Amino acid sequence: MSVPYTAELDTALKAVRLASQVCRTVQSRITPDVLEKKDKSPVTVADFASQAVICRTLADAFPNDPIIAEEDSAELRTGEQSAFRDRIAADVHSVGLTGTSDDICDWIDRGRTTTFAPRFWTLDPIDGTKGFVRREQYAVALALIVNGQIEVGVLGCPNLPVTPGSETRGVLFAAVRGQGAFAIPLDGETTRTRLSVRRTNDPKDAVICESVESGHSDHDVSAQIARSLGVTAKSVRMDSQAKYAAVARGEADAYLRLPTRADYREKIWDHAAGVLVVEEAGGKVTDVAGNPLDWTHGQSLAVNRGVIVTHPALHAAVLKAVLDAGVR
């Protein structure tokens, strides 16, 4: 008997692995001089190249599947961007995908879908751009949504240790609904390690994970919530959906993404892959009101506010502390 979504998972793993290799290559070129000048060109090159690689790989396997992604090539197609296009093309070619600059722009634009469909992929080619520039944590995030439900999710985290505390870095986190979540080294080995959230029943013992950037999540309110729960451990701050991976493999007990503006709604590509990885590792994900996330509104989580990620035994206490802090 065939296992559901085997082909989709294999394709997603291949696509994210290739894109992660591209991102690593580009990130290795970031020098102190680039950082000093606050030059964003490396992350822009990696963003476009990563999206091109993934969209091309998905098109080869599933040509009829729409993709909701973060980037489009409109600016790249202008005459003054020809040198930039050449840099992106070189990085795409480095992983064995050949095409002209126009071809690569067309691959990128496969991600221009904005509306819900019965079956579609959602992609963030580099989640955590500031972490990427700092040569810290970032993720390549890809998920398949079918009938409003995430069925496949893959996170590429090139800078995370393969196992907690390991010197070796680079790991893929993957999940298929109903089949569990697992980690695979980005390089060499194909051993799959089953993931499981940490079962910390007492909120005081919890480790909370949050965004580095205060613009992404309200740090002051997070600190208030931690005090309310009696948490004594310092919050772990890292960029990107690597935070979902930290919860899924038991390095942290909760991830809080608290609204910073009344009108802000999260983008689906910032969460879909990580959500399934955590859920399949035994965790629970809701918005700040305790509602499940709704993936049927195109690019955004239009009917949800914020995100709470933890495990079922801790979720009620964290949710109460969030509501008591006045987060709505």
Image: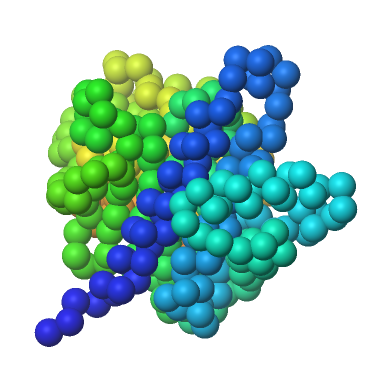
- Write down the quadrant of residue 159 in the picture: top left
Residue 261 visible from this viewpoint: yes
Coloration of the structure image: rainbow
Residue at 29% in and 55% down: 174
- Write down the quadrant of residue 108 in the picture: bottom right
Q: Would you place residue 86 above or below residue 30 in this image? A: below
Q: Quadrant of the C terminus?
A: top right
Looking at this view, name the residue that lies furthest to the left.
1
Percent from the top left, x then y, of residue 131?
52, 30
Residue at 61% in and 37% down: 43
Residue 112 visible from this viewpoint: no
Q: Quadrant of the N terminus?
A: bottom left
Looking at this view, name the residue that lies furthest to the right.
79
Is 140 situated left or right of 232 in this image? right
Front-most of 86 and 118? 86
Percent from the top left, x then y, of residue 206?
26, 28
Is 95 situated left or right of 278 in this image? right
Q: Would you place residue 215 above or below residue 78 in this image? A: above
Percent from the top left, x then y, of residue 14?
36, 59
Percent from the top left, x then y, of residue 99?
61, 64
Is 208 situated left or right of 106 in this image? left
Residue at 50% in and 29% down: 28
Residue at 26% in and 72% down: 6
Front-most of 29 and 247? 29
Is 112 situated left or right of 219 in this image? right
